[in-house]
Amino acid sequence: MGRVAGWLDRRLVVAVLAVGALGVAFPGAGRVVDRRGAIDPTLAVLVLTAGLAVDLGHLSRIGARLARLIAALVAGSIWLPLLAWLLAGAASGGTRDALLSVGVAPPEVASVALTALASGEVPVAATLLVASTLITVVAAGPVLSLLAGASVPAPEGLTVVLAAVVAGPLALGVVARRVVPAPVVLDAGRVVGNLSLLVLLWEVASQVRIGPAYLLAAGLLAAFLAGSGLLAVAVTAGVERSGRPGLLLPLAMRDFAVAAGIAASAFGPRATGALGLYGLLVLLTGTLAARRGSKPDGSGDGSPQEG
């Protein structure tokens, strides 16, 4: 199982491109399953496997990064929704809804694995992921209601959905890691997590309708990714090289999967189409950045040391 997980990890970029292209080229089946509500259960499985990657025993090692973690949480919670709202002013319809949804989304669950690939501090990335996810569950509905107005009919309903689809599975995964920490279980979680990530990307990419509107969407989402990347660089300024990936990757990479769940619940499945483009952008750039920052010895589990 470990070999299978490693094989999938090494080929994730190729798989992301292939699955995204498949969803765009042959969207019929994906749109059918989306109309039947497949996004939420797929997201729940993905988040559960993310919880399996969180080792609470390592959280005691984040003390030296606490100030940076708080800065990342506060800056991300304020700047990213505002950035998304500013960019959404240049769009309408599904693109606008997708931008607002990604603005309130937590870090990409794959950022924890990518932090390890980049020889970064995995406990820091995992803590940032969990804390930001909880903020999203509580705040996404009210923030979207503020930014999108009447187009979000029931923000409290979105909070309930996020609690069931995101917070609940995440907690279940974290508990399962503590109860059954066997390597085969963790490796199986990596395999299922990668597969569910690809399935969700296929579901979301099937909503893409190629045309001028999606060229605009791609440009705006790329601008959002660049803006979140600049924020991450600012937050990690002054941190030594080994400490940057655990903060930079989760802050720069918003979770297209959770954003798709938010968009589908708040605006309907057609609002998720542009998020397929964002998913491709964020996974490709994140993976390439992690590989560029990786070290030959693969070390990345050391204790944080603030610079």
Image: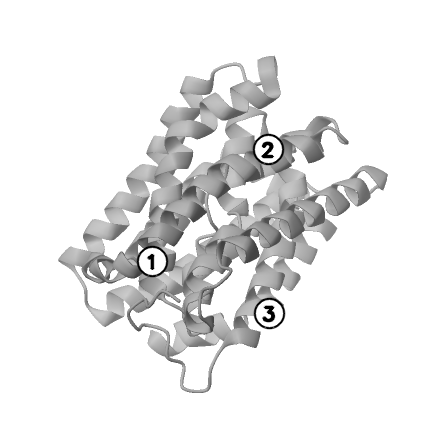
144 sits left or right of 52 in the view: right
Q: Nearer the viewer, residue 180 or 35?
A: 180
Residue 135 % position (x, y): 38, 36
Residue wearing tag 1: 65
Q: CA distance from mark 3 to mark 2?
A: 27 Å
Q: Earlier in the sequence, mark 3 or mark 1?
A: 1
Q: Quadrant of residue 86?
A: top right
Q: Nearer the viewer, mark 3 or mark 2?
A: 2
Residue wearing tag 2: 82
Q: Nearer the viewer, residue 7 or 59?
A: 59
Residue wearing tag 3: 288
Give the residue type that dot 1 points to: Arg
Where disc 2 sits, the SS reads: helix
Q: Nearer the viewer, mark 3 or mark 1?
A: 1
Q: CA distance from mark 3 to mark 1?
A: 25 Å
Give the residue type that dot 3 points to: Leu
Compared with residue 79, is residue 297 higher up or lower down, i.e. above or below? below
Give the residue type that dot 2 points to: Leu
Q: Earlier in the sequence, mark 3 or mark 2?
A: 2
169 sits left or right of 157 in the view: left
Where disc 1 sits, the SS reads: helix
Q: Earlier in the sequence, mark 1 or mark 2?
A: 1
Image quarter hosting the C terminus: bottom left
Residue at screen point 47% across, 37% down: 77
